[in-house]
Amino acid sequence: MTLEALVVSRDPDTLRVLRSALSKLDVSVHVCAGTEAAREIMAAKKFDAIIIDCDDMPGGTDVLQQVRQERSNKSSVTFAILNGVNNVRTVFQMGAGFVLQKPITITNALRSFHAAYGLMHRERRRYFRMPVEIPVKLNYGNGRKLQVSACNLSEGGMAIQAAAALPNDLYRVQFTLPGTDITLSPKAELAWSDASGKGGVRFLELTLNAREQLENWLVQKMQEREPILNVVPG
């Protein structure tokens, strides 16, 4: 499962060190040498980590603040690179989770990335949606049952399609993980729906064993969908 990081910087020494450190952790690197390009790609793509040169990149702190406003990346792990202009408290208040001080060394960069590595993997699993086409049974509190189709599946829920508008009093869903004989029956609620029968289901309660089975299945599917390394010009 290859993680993806966006680096917003035009400092060649910083880029060289970060590329080297991230490659040791098998993290693919996307580089933006300008803040406008960074805003555009953040609006269109999800990253596991976003690393922003806040002091030597004009508008860097604006990009850092924008991360928490972007729907796709609001929970991404963020790093602020400082060079004596902004202080640590300031960038933490802006949403940074980690700080790298210039001059950055491989040792210091690896120390920070190792500390954040588990968070990046957890965020990847939480965000990942696997396209599926599977039948799902919806169970309601009054004993009524309804069969629908799921079109994607994640750690926290699924997107579904029914023939008509969905009732709101959902209690539990039941489905089998594609390619397995593992059937899961989590307590759930209807997170959203529309008049066409489309809806989103949020899982409320899974047994420990069921959660591990779902997470293992998702990790396997993530590993089958390796991302491609990209470099974005400024």
Image (tube, grey):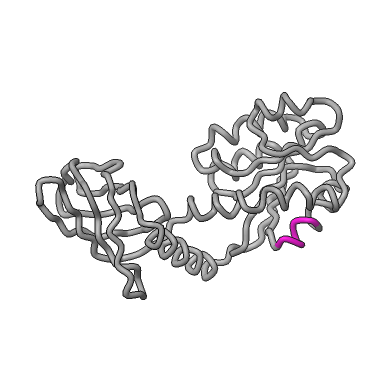
Q: Percent x, y for residue 222? A: 51, 64
Total marks placed: 0
Residue at 85 percent across and 33 percent down: it is 83
Dividing the picture into quadrants, the one containing residue 60 is: top right
Residue at 63 percent across and 43 percent down: it is 77
Residues drawn in magenta:
21-25
Determine the main secondary structure of the stretch shown in magenta: helix
**Vertical comparison of 87 with 33: above or below:** above
**Vertical comparison of 197 with 35: above or below:** below
In the image, taking residue 105 as reference, residue 62 lies left or right, namely left
Dividing the picture into quadrants, the one containing residue 89 is: top right
In the image, taking residue 149 as reference, residue 94 lies left or right, namely right
In the image, taking residue 83 as reference, residue 98 lies left or right, namely left
In the image shown, does 81 or 125 lie closer to the viewer?
A: 125
Q: Percent x, y for residue 34? A: 72, 39
In the image shown, does 61 or 203 lie closer to the viewer?
A: 203
Q: Quadrant of the C terminus?
A: top right
In the image shown, does 36 or 101 lie closer to the viewer?
A: 101
Residue at 29 percent across and 41 percent down: it is 192
